[in-house]
Image: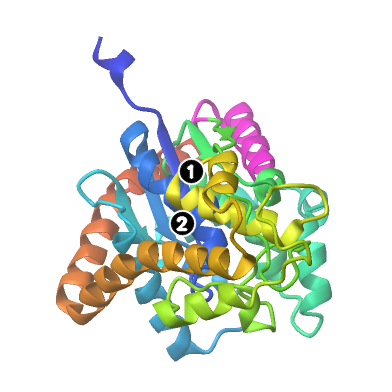
């Protein structure tokens, strides 16, 4: 009976490269908070993945701590989930080597993200950039998750992890759970505020195009007031109104109002009123998160203790899987 009631295990990781945007929050992070109720969740700050592109050490250190604090601030609860920093669990890199020797060169060559990033960072096409899908497979397989929440851009890596797990199990006997990709009920697909045909991105050169989760209330409202719209000046959802459609989707995601209800609420009002309302709704959502994050960052000792606890708990689970894989491959264990 107990086995039937066991929650399915899920794992999600996020790189500490800059502050997430409103798009990251509404599209994924807010769903993680809900996932805690339905799944046995493992969440990691994937700092080892960040160094495939050169990072400034002091900035990286700060971003790792801030990302850990942010995940707590949005509502990830160490009493319900296991939250840790990837590099604090050495089993990730240890299993990665075992899996590297069971991953084919051709498989990694076909990864579209390697091709994209190689083009962007032509001066630093390093081995880590090529092999990081194998580290990602180790991240996943160490915790024996039943499912991996994936966005469209990670489907290929998820499939590779499944292939590696199946190959390893075929060669050495049943070792890893072969995880199923889990397409999450998507949050809002948030577009750029300055070019609503594009996705909102923190790497956009125009800072007015995205909302950072660290933007204060005045900045949020100012950016929404500057958002690109059309000349109709009527709040309605329709083809060819990309800017207003984007703002309506954001407002809907934050307030829970349907698109029809939003049209009715702003009947006869101009875009200025609507943009201000969206900005205020977003700022009211983000302000308590920012306050919790600042409180956490101010108590360095408590934050480090939470990191230590997360690392110890993750290491216990990961260590068992690593030992099993080493034994199956024929290593001498002490």
Q: Position of residue 116 (x, y in %)?
A: 80, 66
Q: Position of residue 223 (x, y in %)?
A: 57, 78
Q: Residue at x 47, y 49 (%)?
A: 12
Q: Is residue 175 left or right of residue 301?
A: right
Is 90 or 148 nearer to us in this picture? 148
Q: Which mark is residue 257?
A: 1
For the stretch drawn in magenta, what is the main secondary structure? helix
Q: Position of residue 164 (x, y in %)?
A: 64, 40
Residue occupying image coordinates x 50% and y 49%: 253
Say which element carries label 2: helix
Circle on res. 183? none
Outermost residue on the top side: it is 1
- Image coordinates of residue 17 in percent, x first then y, are 53, 74
Which quadrant of the figure has residue 131?
bottom right
Q: Which residue is at the front of the view, 129 or 190?
A: 190
Q: Which residues are magenta?
A: 158-177
Magenta stretch contains residue 60? no
Q: Quadrant of residue 243?
A: bottom right
Query: Contact (CB < 8 A) between labels 1 and 2?
Result: no
Instruction: Tell me where residue 130 sits by quadrant.
Output: bottom right
For the point 65% across and 72% down, the residue is 227
Q: CA distance from mark 1 to mark 2?
A: 43 Å
Residue highlighted by disc 2: 92
Q: Is residue 269 above or below residue 144?
A: below
Q: Secondary structure at mark 1?
A: loop
Mark 2 or mark 1, which is nearer the start of the sequence?
Answer: 2
Q: How many numbered marks, from 0 up?
A: 2
Q: Is residue 245 visible?
A: yes
């Amino acid at each position: 009976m107990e086995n039937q009631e066991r929650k399915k295990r899920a794992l999600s990781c996020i790189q500490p490269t800059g502050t997430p945007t409103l798009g990251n929050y509404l599209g994924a992070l807010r769903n993680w908070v809900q996932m805690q109720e339905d799944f046995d969740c493992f969440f990691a700050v994937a700092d080892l993945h960040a160094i495939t592109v050169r990072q400034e050490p002091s900035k990286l250190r700060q971003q790792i701590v801030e990302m850990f604090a942010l995940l707590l601030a949005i509502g990830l609860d160490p009493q319900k989930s296991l939250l840790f920093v990837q590099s604090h669990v050495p089993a990730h890199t240890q299993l990665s080597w075992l899996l590297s020797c069971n991953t084919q060169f051709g498989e990694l060559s076909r990864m579209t993200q390697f091709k994209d990033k190689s083009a962007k960072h032509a001066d630093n096409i390093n081995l880590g950039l090529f092999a990081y899908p194998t580290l990602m497979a180790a991240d996943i397989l160490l915790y024996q998750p039943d499912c991996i929440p994936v966005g469209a851009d990670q489907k290929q890596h998820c499939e590779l992890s499944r292939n590696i797990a199946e190959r390893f199990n075929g060669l050495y006997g049943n070792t890893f759970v072969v995880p199923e990709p889990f397409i999450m009920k998507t949050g809002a697909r948030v577009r750029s505020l300055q070019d609503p045909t594009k996705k909102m991105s923190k790497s956009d050169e125009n800072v007015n195009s995205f909302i950072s989760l660290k933007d204060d209330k005045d900045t949020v409202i100012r950016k929404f007031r500057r958002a690109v719209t059309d000349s109709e000046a009527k709040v309605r959802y329709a083809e060819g109104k990309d800017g207003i459609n984007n703002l309506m989707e954001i407002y809907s995601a934050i307030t829970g109002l349907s698109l029809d209800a939003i049209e009715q609420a702003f009947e006869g009002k101009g875009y200025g009123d609507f943009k201000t309302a969206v900005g205020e709704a977003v700022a009211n959502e983000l302000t308590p998160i920012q306050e919790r994050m600042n409180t956490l960052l101010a108590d360095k000792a408590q934050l480090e203790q939470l990191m230590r606890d997360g690392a110890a708990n993750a290491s216990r689970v990961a260590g068992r899987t690593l030992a099993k894989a080493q034994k199956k491959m024929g290593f001498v264990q002490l």
